[in-house]
Amino acid sequence: MISYYKPIRIILILFLLLTCGKTSFAQTDSVTVNNDKTVVLTSKFLGEKRTIWIHLPSDYSTTSTTYPVLYLLDGGNHFKYVSEAVEYLAGYDRNRMPQMIVVAILNVDRTRDFTPIHSLLFDGKVDTTKMGKTGGGPKFLQFIKNELVPYVDKNYRTEPYRILSAHSLGGIFALYVKEAAPDLFQANILISPAIYGGNTKILTDFAPFLQSHQQLRGKNFISIGNENRQKVDSLMLVLKTTAPTSFTWKFEQYPDENHFSVTYKSVYDGLRFIYSNWFIDYYSQIKMSMTDINAHFSKLSDEFGYTINPSEDLLNNCGYQQLNLKNMDEAIGIFKENVQKHPTSSNAYDSLGEAYMRNGNKVLAIKNYKRSIELNPGNTSGKETLKKLESNMN
């Protein structure tokens, strides 16, 4: 697991970035710390600099893979444990979801940014006494939609699948985003959404929005702790009565958690819900053929709306399962598919070479071991096997 910033390092990094950065639109400053990066964007819409933390998958620098993106509101509070949860769930043998880029938006004025509507007094004037500045949600949405997302898509290898995770006041902003920009995020994790005051109008508007968007697709996980659920129940009623079948959702209450401690379980379970059909149990599916694998990922591609290919590790594992069962043709077919999908992987060629060797085809075994070593000159095991194969050819 990656080591995370020490607090002093965060302060030092942000001080250097904020004092050295230019002020022109789209000007960015960044520093890499392991697989985590701090980026400072100068926003035209917000008229200020915004700090973004980005976590890249562990294999990002060694592959050409593209990834879905998880965006976090209140990013400074949730970045570390969410990044670790994603790495855990996507890890080898667990395989509960794909590897994913995590983008955390740090707060400047969360009340201003997360409230789409001004809090008003009885005389119609803006009420700044209880919540401070409010009503900045539309500008914050413009920042995310027109500055942050384009920056991430331009500078990182992303897939057109974005998830928004929002806690408390961020939950009402997430509902607003779904109404104002329905296609921006394909899935939402709403954690104890704080629906009250003038922004209750967002909930009131949600039913007619869904009724007029019956082709809307998406996945939504909504949670709450041991707190008043009246407004959340109202949201559930709207979803039950008006949401199209293509707009799937799940609600979970955690009676042993409060408004603040509920976040970790919610993110974990929310990701499990979104990717509930992702999992392949390597150990029970020991006879999974290439046809089975292709069928599984074809269904996932239809479900998520973009082409999803099996990972190198999955294909390699399934190939060896077939090899150990002595299903040589099936094993070689899977390893060949792995080489085709991951042509820069030394390990993929090494495995294909081993399959050909165990099937008695020394010529093709030698060819693939040579390619594996070209891609990774440090493959000492491959070199030893190649030497034995070549000596037996003489």
Image (tube, helix red, strand yellow):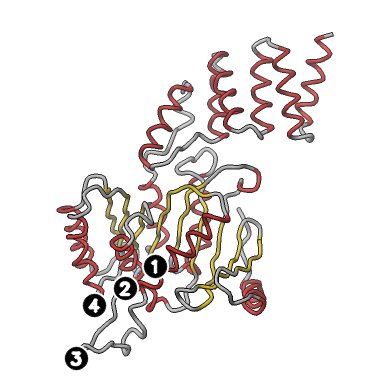
| Pointer 3 residue | 123
> Which label's residue is closer to the chain start, 1 or 4?
1
Give the percent coordinates (x, y) of residue 8: 65, 75
User: In whole angstroms, how far apart are the C-alphas of marks 3 and 1?
Assistant: 28 Å
- Circle 2 sits on which residue? 116
State the residue position of label 1. Answer: 141
Give amino acid for label 4: Gly
Residues at marks 2 and 4 touching, judged by CB atoms closer than 8 Å = no
Kind of residue sitting beneath label 2: Pro
- Nearer the camera: disc 2 or disc 4: 2
Residue 68 position, x and y percent, is 47, 49
Q: Are marks 2 and 1 in contact (CB under 8 Å)?
A: no
* 2 or 4: tag closer to the N-terminus: 2
Tell whether 236 sits left or right of 102.
left
x 24%, y 77%: residue? 198
Q: Nearer the viewer, mark 4 or mark 3?
A: 3
For disc 1, the neighbor class at 10 Å (few under 14, some 14 to 19, many from 20) is many
Distance from Cα at disc 1 to Cα at disc 4: 18 Å
Q: What whole-number distance in Å separates the C-alpha atoms at marks 2 and 1?
A: 9 Å
Q: Residue at x 62, y 77 (%)?
A: 18
Q: Earlier in the sequence, mark 3 or mark 1?
A: 3
The C terminus, quarter of image: top right
- Kindly state the secondary structure of the residue where label 3 is placed: loop
> What is the three-letter code of the residue carrying label 3?
Asp
Instruction: State the residue in front, 129 or 217.
Output: 217
The image shows residue 274, relative to residue 210, as above or below, that is above
Q: Amino acid at mark 1?
A: Leu
What residue is pinned by disc 4? 198
